[in-house]
Image (spheres, grey):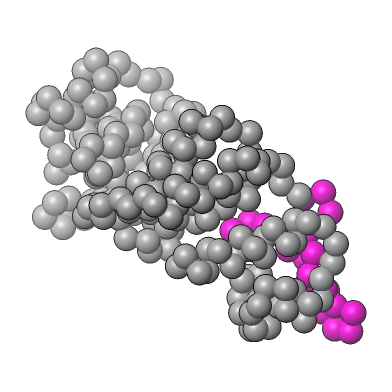
Amino acid sequence: MADVTERMLRLLATLQGGGSFSGEDLARRLGVSPRTLRRDVDRLRAYGYPVMTRPGPGGHYRFAVGQRLPPLLLEDDEAVAVVIGLAALTAAGPAHPGALADAAGRAYGKVDTLLPARLRSRAAALRTTIEAERAPAPEVSARTLGTLAEAIAAGEIVAFDYRDAGGRPSARRVEAHRQVSIDLTWYLLGWDLGRGDWRVFRTDRIANLLRTGARHAGRALPAETALEFLRSGLSRAAP
């Protein structure tokens, strides 16, 4: 994985340097085969980098005009915090496509290219010297966390399919209020419209999540904080 990350960073740095590169020239600069180069370019595109390709005679690779990324302006301690945080998230679960650990791992590989030169050596040292314990944790989708966050911020009702601890399925409509992370597990606290009560849902058991666009008026939380509610033992797992 480290070799792939290093190769991707070299490709990214080369393309961000400006200009156009033939496939043969770019492969030679990076010391890879044309097939590997094509795979790496596809990876960059999947990560959202606008790599333009002109096929045929005189063909080349280049970044789209106006898409060069600026340095990420972080203080030294902020850069350390970012790298350590991403390392911890990467180790917190399986790196399956779409999972939070997978997204953290990809961001981990990108952050070097956005740091100013004076911080790159420190970030590289952190990447090569940190080992984080890989603790078993439920796999949660980064997309699900992002969608729930947007719904909570907008005061929206969400709809989703849910499986309880016994595997029993149900369809839910919920006023989403808070997301809580406890012991490497993510939860949604919300008012279940079908049950007429507060419920806590394991985020990794949520599927087919939809923002309905319907707004709710908001409610006072059943405790001082959502975290306190979950920790207190007053909460009930969604039946």
Q: Is residue 95 left or right of residue 133?
A: right
Q: Is residue 213 left or right of residue 131?
A: right
Q: Residue furthest right?
A: 58
* Residue 224: image location, x then y, percent: 24, 15
Asked if residue 66 is positioned above or below residue 96 in the image, the reply reads above
In which image quadrant can residue 179 be found? Answer: top left
Q: Is residue 176 magenta?
A: no
Q: Is residue 39 left or right of residue 66?
A: left
Nearest the eye: 43 or 214: 43
* Residue 215: image location, x then y, percent: 45, 28
Tell me what residue is drawn at x 40 percent, y 34 percent: 157
Nearest the eye: 188 or 22: 22
Nearest the eye: 19 or 219: 19
Task: Locate the N terminus and report the quarter of the image it occupies.
Answer: bottom left
Q: Is residue 23 visible?
A: no
Tell me what residue is drawn at x 46 percent, y 44 percent: 83
Q: Which residues are magenta?
A: 46-67
Tell me what residue is drawn at x 25 percent, y 52 percent: 133
Q: Is residue 102 left or right of residue 234?
A: right
* Residue 39: image location, x then y, percent: 61, 76
Nearest the eye: 220 or 27: 27
* Residue 126: image location, x then y, percent: 44, 47
Q: Is residue 40 visible?
A: yes
Asked if residue 225 is positioned above or below residue 123 in the image, the reply reads above
Instruction: State how many labels appear.
Output: 0
